[in-house]
Image: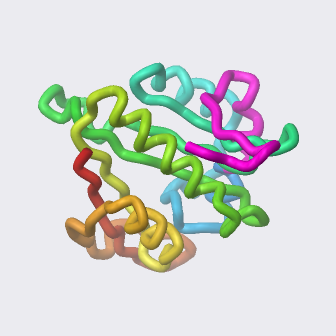
């Protein structure tokens, strides 16, 4: 992965949790990218963090000491038969969207998934998030279905598009 000077994607650490939490809370309040409806505390994100490890990395995009976004691989299911399948998550601060932050994070997540010998990555993308669909298409994710009206946020029932990359 190549990034410009002063830009980097790196593995997150516990010290990054305040920024990760703030970015996620912005998404909760302003977007349908997550179906969480109540802001998360640092304690909640710490518990979430401890569910991740080397095999389920959390990454941050940092430029000049500021974290603009984060991404992670998470379990698709805790059932053993799904052990080669993960789900990706990417969140970028509103004012930095469209500047390649999500692109850099997704590229690195895919590389890490391949290095780990994972088989497939699933993306769940809420209707209306065309930028995320285009980003995933750029990396050869294919649509595999639409879950109709499965979530409610901001007073509206929303569809979720499923996309898949077989590694």
**Quadrant occupied by the N terminus:** top right
Q: Residue at x 32, y 40 (%)?
A: 86
Q: Is residue 100 above or below residue 84?
A: below
Q: Is residue 36 left or right of residue 67?
A: left
Q: Position of residue 37 (x, y in %)?
A: 57, 57
Q: Position of residue 105 (x, y in %)?
A: 56, 47
Q: Residue at x 46, y 20 (%)?
A: 54
Q: Position of residue 160 (x, y in %)?
A: 35, 68
Report the residue that reaches farthest toward the right.
64
Camera-nearest residue between 142 and 46 = 142
Label count reads 0
Camera-nearest residue between 60 and 4 = 4
Q: Position of residue 93 (x, y in %)?
A: 72, 57
Q: Is residue 32 above or below residue 78?
A: below
Q: Residue at x 27, y 33 (%)?
A: 118
**Quadrant occupied by the C terminus:** top left
Q: Residue at x 75, y 45 (%)?
A: 7
Q: How was this image coloured? A: rainbow
Q: Which residues are magenta?
A: 1-23
> Magenta stretch: residue 99 in it?
no
Q: Is residue 76 left or right of residue 74?
A: left
Q: Quadrant of residue 101?
A: bottom right
> Magenta stretch: residue 6 in it?
yes
């Amino acid at each position: 992965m190549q990034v410009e000077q002063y830009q980097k994607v790196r593995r997150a650490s516990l010290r990054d949790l305040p920024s990760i939490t703030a970015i996620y809370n912005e998404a909760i309040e302003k977007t349908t990218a997550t179906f969480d409806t109540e802001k998360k505390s640092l304690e909640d994100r710490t518990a979430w963090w401890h569910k991740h490890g080397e095999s389920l990395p959390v990454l941050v995009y940092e430029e000049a000491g500021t974290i603009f976004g984060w991404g992670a691989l998470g379990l698709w299911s805790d059932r053993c038969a799904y052990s080669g399948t993960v789900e990706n998550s990417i969140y970028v601060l509103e004012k930095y969207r469209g500047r390649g932050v999500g692109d850099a994070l997704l590229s690195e997540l895919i590389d890490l998934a391949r290095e780990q010998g994972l088989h497939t990555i699933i993306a769940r993308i809420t209707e209306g998030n065309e930028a995320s669909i285009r980003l995933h298409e750029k990396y050869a994710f294919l649509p595999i279905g639409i879950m109709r009206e499965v979530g409610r946020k901001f007073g509206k029932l929303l569809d979720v598009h499923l996309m898949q990359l077989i590694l």
